Image (spheres, rainbow, N blue to C red):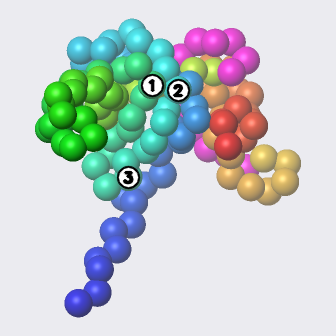
């Protein structure tokens, strides 16, 4: 039996490594860097946002067990990209750059969001 491959429904306005602001939910107003985008669920993990506590069972190496704080996921629609030029949250669009490639741009300033803005 072959594994079913799901393709993304659309391209997202944020990518891993972007700095974002949470605009809705319990973590509203917090800033952080996107660690991972979960395409199948339209969600993202952001550093320091939506913290959850996981209970770890006792093991031979850890006989007491443990409580670990980790980032939960936030829906993509509750995140807004921070414009690298101004440091303000901005809506994004896509347009063709001088090299003929589609690239994200800030709707507030009109400037392209450089790929170097993301951490590789």
Instruction: Determine which of the numbered discs, if any, sits on residue 47 in the image.
Output: 1
Q: Are marks 2 and 1 in contact (CB under 8 Å)?
A: yes
Specify few, some or many for label 2: CA neighbours under 10 Å numbering under 14, 14-19, or 20 or more. many
Specify the quadrant that holds the C terminus: top right
Please determine whether, in this image, residue 50 is positioned above or below residue 42.
above
Secondary structure under badge 1? Answer: loop
Secondary structure under badge 2? Answer: strand
Residue 91 visible (yes or no): no
State which tag comes first along the sequence, 2 or 3: 2
Name the magenta segment's main secondary structure. loop
Instruction: Determine which of the numbered discs, if any, sits on residue 33 in the image.
Output: 2
Specify the quadrant that holds the N terminus: bottom left
The residues tagged by marks 2 and 1 sit, at their Cα atoms, a distance apart of: 6 Å
Q: Quadrant for residue 30, please give it.
A: top left
Specify few, some or many for label 1: CA neighbours under 10 Å numbering under 14, 14-19, or 20 or more. many
Q: Which residues are magenta?
A: 84-96
State which tag comes first along the sequence, 3 or 1: 3
Q: Tell whether 45 sits left or right of 31.
A: left
Q: Residue at x 31, y 55 (%)?
A: 40
Q: Quadrant for residue 51, please give it.
A: top left
């Amino acid at each position: 039996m072959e594994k079913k491959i799901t393709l993304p429904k659309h391209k997202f306005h944020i990518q891993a490594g972007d700095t974002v602001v949470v605009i809705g939910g319990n973590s509203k107003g917090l800033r952080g860097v996107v660690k991972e985008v979960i395409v199948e669920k339209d969600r993202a993990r952001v550093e320091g946002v939506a913290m959850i506590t996981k209970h770890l069972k006792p093991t031979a190496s850890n006989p007491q067990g443990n409580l670990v704080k980790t980032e939960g996921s936030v829906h993509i629609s509750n995140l807004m990209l921070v414009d690298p030029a101004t440091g303000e949250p901005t809506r994004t669009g896509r347009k063709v750059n001088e090299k003929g490639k589609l690239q994200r741009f800030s709707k507030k300033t009109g400037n392209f969001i450089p790929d170097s803005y993301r951490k590789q």
